[in-house]
Image: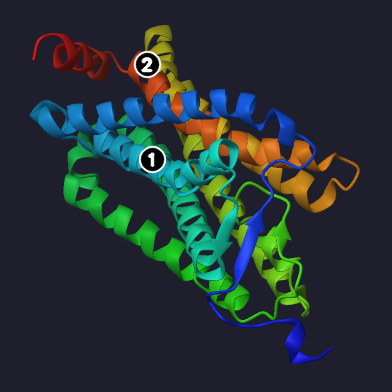
Amino acid sequence: MTTSNFTLSNSLTFILAGIPGLEDAHGWISIPFSMCYTINLLGNVMVLSVVGKEQTLHQPMYLLLCMLALTDITTSTTVVPKVLCIFWFNLKDITLGGCVTQMFFLHTFSVLQSSVLVAMAFDRYVAICNPLRYTTILSNTQIAKLGLVGLTRAILFLLPMPLLLSRLPFCAIRIIPHTYCENIAVAKMSCGDITVIRAYGLVISIVVTGIDVSLIVLSYALIIRAVLRVSSKGTHQKALNTCTAHICVMLLNWIPSLFSLMTHRFGQGIALHVHIILANLYLLIPPMLNPIIYGFQSKELREKMVKFNFIR
């Protein structure tokens, strides 16, 4: 193959096809997409505003919730505005540089979100199992350090992927059958060998998910053990209520993500538009529901939200 068939220039352009097979329905599909994205922004910005203005909420639990809100906003904003441009205005072009940037921010903040969920599980463990040492173990400074460690980990894990992709030779036909620049979908546009990229993406997914899920399971195993040692039913109920929101958010984030990953890599018998819709639901539904779940579950946060919106 001659070099005339491809180029390594960052000005190289791809076409995002949207949802193949459902092009005629893009206008209708955009309605739930835009509604979910709007609710996501309103809910998470409200959480950030309320926690920022209320001094009584400057506690580790709510600072972690703010980190979760920031990752929700960032991951969805990295993708959804471009998706809506495809649906509404048929603006499907994206440069290689834009593609690489999009996937880097998307996956970096997705991994950071996983780290925040681990920190939330640890927060619940300390609050229930070591309540007298809670303020010593988890100060606001410690939470900031955990956030920085999570961000550093995400960058170190994900930076090689866009670097590897940007060095690939790409063929003349560069139509990505997706709504955004997903790693494997972009790699398949290459004329070169993508074995390393496939393997690296799978390993990172398994390592990050395996480590984080193991730490969360360990935290909740220790919580359950500590709770079962106490005979009071009231204590059991209080511990359950304390952890319910985090468990719901954790399942809401990981189940669609893992299902989408597995179907994309191993579900060859599943229609392409189903793959793409699942991948987009992961970016739409959890960010929209996370602030709602915590708003309903946390009485203090709910009261401050009411005060912030209807009194001030």
Q: Position of residue 16 (x, y in %)?
A: 64, 53
Question: Can you tell which mark lies on residue 56?
Answer: none
Where disc 2 sits, the SS reads helix
Q: Which residue is mark 2?
A: 297
Left or right: 165 in relation to 248: right
Nearest the camera: 38 or 88? Answer: 88
Residue 38 image position (x, y, % from top left): 41, 27
- 34 vs 206, nearest the viewer: 34
Which image quarter holds the N terminus? bottom right
Residue 254 shows in the view:
no
Instruction: Specify how the rendered protein is coloured.
Output: rainbow
Looking at the rendered structure, the kind of residue marked 2 is Gln
Residue 94 vertical placement versus 121 (above, below)? below
Residue 221 locus on image (x, y percent):
53, 35
Q: Is residue 11 left or right of residue 188?
A: left
Is residue 5 left or right of 162 when viewed as pictured? right
Three-letter code for the amino acid on which mark 1 is drawn: Ile
* Quarter residue 241 falls in: top left
Q: Which residue is mark 1?
A: 73
Q: Is residue 149 above or below residue 57?
A: below
At 18% from the left and 45% from the top, the residue drawn is 140
Picture quarter with the C terminus: top left
Residue 278 rendering spot, x and y as whole percentages: 68, 36
Which of the two marks, 1 or 2, is nearer to us in this view?
1
Q: Is residue 251 visible?
A: yes
For the residue carrying disc 2, how many other residues have a C-alpha within 10 Å: few (<14), some (14-19), or many (20+)? some
Q: Which of the two labelled residues, at mark 1 and mark 2, occupies the earlier sequence position?
A: 1
Mark 1 Cα shell of 10 Å, populated few (<14), some (14-19), many (≥20): many
Per the model, the C-alpha gap separating discs 1 and 2 is 21 Å
